[in-house]
Amino acid sequence: MSVGSYYYLLAQLPHLLYEQKPPMSSSAFIDLALPLLDEGDAALFKQLSLDTGTVSSGDGHSYAAAAQSTGCDFIDGWRLWERALRLNLAKHRSIKRKLDTPSAEPPYAPADAAAAAVKAINSATPLDGEIAIDRARWDAIGVLAGNDYFDRNNVFAYFLKLLLIERRQSFDTEKGINEYESLYTSIRGTASRHSGGQWLADSEQ
């Protein structure tokens, strides 16, 4: 894909704000972006997800072990960040509830992922915790995308941010509570079963 094509795609996109309604759906962005991506970037794009424990290509991986490199710094960085978040959430939730600590020891880097887990666990309500997590994800995606606005990283980042906005729009108090509980229950169950069988990962979409 040429540099011009990246410029054409990204220059026409409206700015995204977490607090506002998305200017387009994530599915509409897929339809817009995919025809402009070269074959390699399109394959990487199809692996993007908020749930990095399983990927669309079918090579499911656990959160206990780091995923294999995709060759894309942005996607690899995003997976490492989300893994650190998930495992730290599982640990701190178990400590708070006085449950058995998951056997998969969480990494403490990236530090902002570990800190986001602590903030979420200590939030006043489950919904506040969910929003704190997604705000931390939003910031991490921006850092990972880097300063070259017209490269593929920012195409990937735009899509992930659309998914986060859609997720935010879907929240209400009851649903937020249910998602929060489901997220951590699934993480803890996954971490405690790392020694055998198929790993399970929760879906965020």
Image (tube, rainbow, N blue to C red):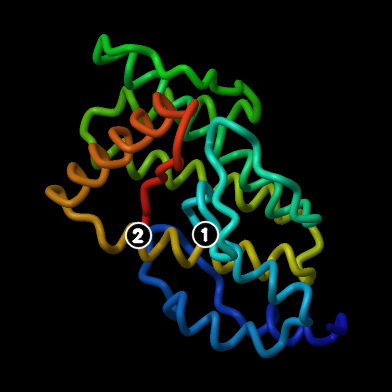
Q: Give above or below for 70 relative to 134.
A: below
Using the image, tell me which numbered label, if any, was put on residue 49: 1
Q: Give above or below for 80 relative to 122.
A: below
Estimate the spatial distance between the alpha carbons at disc 1 and disc 2, rounded to whole Å: 12 Å
Within-10-Å neighbours for mark 2: few <14, some 14–19, many 20+: some
Task: Identify which amino acid the numbered label 1 is placed on.
Answer: Ser
Q: Position of residue 187 (x, y in %)?
A: 38, 34
Residue where numbered disc 2 is placed: 167
Q: Position of residue 129 (x, y in %)?
A: 32, 36
Q: Secondary structure at mark 1?
A: loop
Frontmost of labels 1 and 2 is 1
Viewer-side residue, 61 vs 139: 61
Q: Position of residue 34 (x, y in %)?
A: 64, 84
Residue at point 26%, 62% (across, down)? 170
Task: Identify which amino acid the numbered label 2 is placed on.
Answer: Arg
Q: Secondary structure at mark 2?
A: helix
Mark 1 and mark 2 lie on one chain; the one further toward the N terminus is 1
Viewer-side residue, 163 vs 184: 184
Does 37 sit left or right of 103 as displayed?
right
Quadrant location, the N terminus: bottom right
Does 91 sit left or right of 126 as displayed?
right
Quadrant location, the C terminus: bottom left
Residue at point 73%, 82% (across, down)? 37
